[in-house]
Every structure is written in C-alpha cells, then in structure tokens.
Image (cartoon, rainbow, N blue to C red):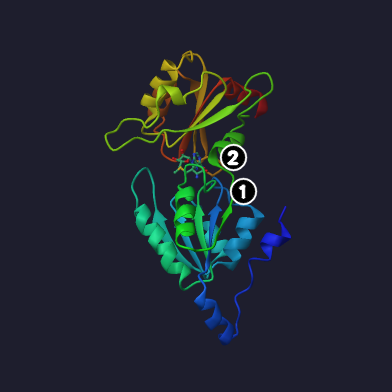
Amino acid sequence: MLRPRRQSRLRPRPADPVMNDALQQTPGTVYLVGAGPGDPGLLTLRARDCLLQADAVVYDALVNADLLTLYAPSAEHVYAGKRSGRHVLPQADIQTLLLELSGRCRHIVRLKGGDPLVFGRGGEEAAFLRAHGIPYEIVPGVTAGVGASAAAGIPITHRGIARGVTFLTGHREADGTLSLGLDDVPKRGTLVFYMGVGSLPALIELVLASGRAPETPAAVIESGTCPGQRVLASTVGEIVALASQSQVHPPALLVVGDVVALREHLL
Ligand SMILES: C[S@@+](CC[C@H](N)C(=O)[O-])C[C@H]1O[C@@H](n2cnc3c(N)ncnc32)[C@H](O)[C@@H]1O
C-alpha cells in the first residue's frame, strides 16, 4: 500500500520560472528503484509513481525496457548496462552520472532489476549519494530469487520441507574463482544462486562439497516471469549436463533443495 507521506514527496514539476530557479539551488532526489524480475506487472505502485515523475532514468540491462515506454516516455533515458560482468558504464561513472543529473533534474530514477539492494550495488550507490549530500530514497522491488521461483512453481520455503532460504551469488573474481566459499553454503534449507550460468559447474561442486546429496532436487530458471521463461528441473548430480544441453542463457537462477520437487504438485 502507498504511504501518503512518501507519495507527497513526489511533487509535480513547477511551471513557475521563479520556482524553477529556486529549485535549481537544491539537488534533485535520486530514487533507487527496483523494477522486479521482468514482468512489468510485478512493478510496485511506488516504483510506477517514481517513473511517472522522473526527469531522467538510468537503467540496467535486466530492466524491462517496456517500463520506460509505459511510464517515463518523455524522461531522459540513460542505459547503464551491466550484464554478466560486461559493464557499459563502470560503477564509478554511474555514480558520477547520478551526481551530475541531480544538479539539473528534480527526480532521477536509478532503475535496477529485481530489488536494488539484492546483488544490485544499490547500497554502494546510496552510500555515495549520502556522502555527496544528494537526497535519495530506496524503493524496494521483487527480487528474482522470490519472483522467478514463484513463477516457476517453486515455494522457496515450505512447512516441513525448508525452514529457510539463502540467497547466494555465483559471481566470479577476475581470476575466474568463485567469490563464495564452503562456509557460505548452509547444509539445510533452500539455496538460490544468482549470476550462476557461467559458474554452474563450480557452484554444483561447492553444493556437493557442502554435504548435499547428488539426488537433491535442483532447477535452473531462465528469464523468470518473462515470456521466454524456461525451467529446467533435475537433480544436483544432473543439472550441469541438462543446462549445457539446453543452452541456458542469462539471466538465470539455480535453485537447490527439496522444495524444487514440489513444483510437480503446484503447476
Ligand atoms: C546483478 S544480479 C541482480 C539481481 C537483482 N537486483 C534482483 O534483486 O533480482 C543479476 C542476476 O539476477 C538473476 N536474475 C535477474 N532477473 C532474473 C530473471 N528474470 N530470471 C532469472 N534470474 C534472474 C540472474 O541470476 C542474474 O544474473
């Protein structure tokens, strides 16, 4: 539900030139907005309001571009890229851009896939804005681990089967090694790995080393909630071969745990 106090902060742009001059003395507000996992219907009402008021939108690769056409057609659009480690704009340049935009726009939307603070570097951007005295607001979104799993019919927690869920990153360091270690992988509950397509064999090795059996159900969800959604359901022991045969492409998640098997009963 929208909170009126917050909504009132999104005021219409004033037409009065004197007022406009006054506003230029103060920096514009940056809204760090989560766009959800892909389906435009999963955008929150708050996020939609931010887009409707935006003078400029800086957006990432995983954002559904229909959102810009639908809700911010006349705003300035800046593509910031970021897909599988290839950055169109380096993070430092994105932050400098936000600073520059706040000097000449009232409402700047920094639109990120999923939730801005889940593997999205939104925390770094918020800290940067704060350090530079730029007003900002964080607008949560539906993270892929929740939205895509639900769309795939996988309840990431389920009474009697999984008491918890852990979100992990399959991100690799510059030398190709996983940033995760054994200590990061709990022995129980559901595991959801983001950014895992290129790292799938190494992630599965880690899952096995953490003590999970090869028969444990596992699934890869590609383009969850989007028209091209694909769900490959198998086991820890066989998911690498299945993903390779099926030529999985990012964005995709790896979900590991007994809850994956419930899919058959829910769809
Ligand atoms: C840089 S992370 C951003 C995560 C995002 N902030 C969130 O909360 O969902 C990108 C990774 O999220 C996952 N992802 C994002 N959208 C997805 C989707 N529609 N289906 C499956 N995985 C997705 C993929 O693992 C992708 O590599």
x 59%, y 49%: residue? 140
Q: In this view, does 148 lie above or below 2?
A: above
Q: Position of residue 256 (x, y in %)?
A: 51, 24
Front residue (pair 38, 121): 121
Q: Position of residue 204 (x, y in %)?
A: 41, 22
Q: What residue type is labelled 1?
A: Leu
Front residue (pair 148, 25): 25
Query: Which element type, helix, strand or loop, lies under badge 1?
Result: helix
Q: Does the residue labelled 2 lie within 8 Å of ligand 1?
A: yes
Inspect this view and state whether residue 65 appears: no
Label number found at residue 147: 2
x 48%, y 15%: residue? 212
Q: Where is residue 194 in the image (x, y as percent from the top left)?
A: 46, 36
x 45%, y 50%: residue? 124
x 55%, y 77%: residue? 23
Q: Is mark 1 within 8 Å of ligand 1?
A: no
Q: Is residue 105 above or below residue 87?
A: below
Q: In which quarter of the image is the C terminus?
A: top right
Identify the residue position indicated by label 1 in the image. 42
Front residue (pair 126, 68): 126
Q: What residue type is labelled 2?
A: Gly
**Badge 1: how crowded within 10 Å, few (<14), some, or many (20+)?**
some
Disc 1 to disc 2, C-alpha distance: 8 Å
Q: Check the image and name the residue furthest to the left.
A: 175
Q: Tell whether label 2 touches label 1 (CB within 8 Å).
A: yes
Q: Is residue 138 above or below residue 207?
A: below
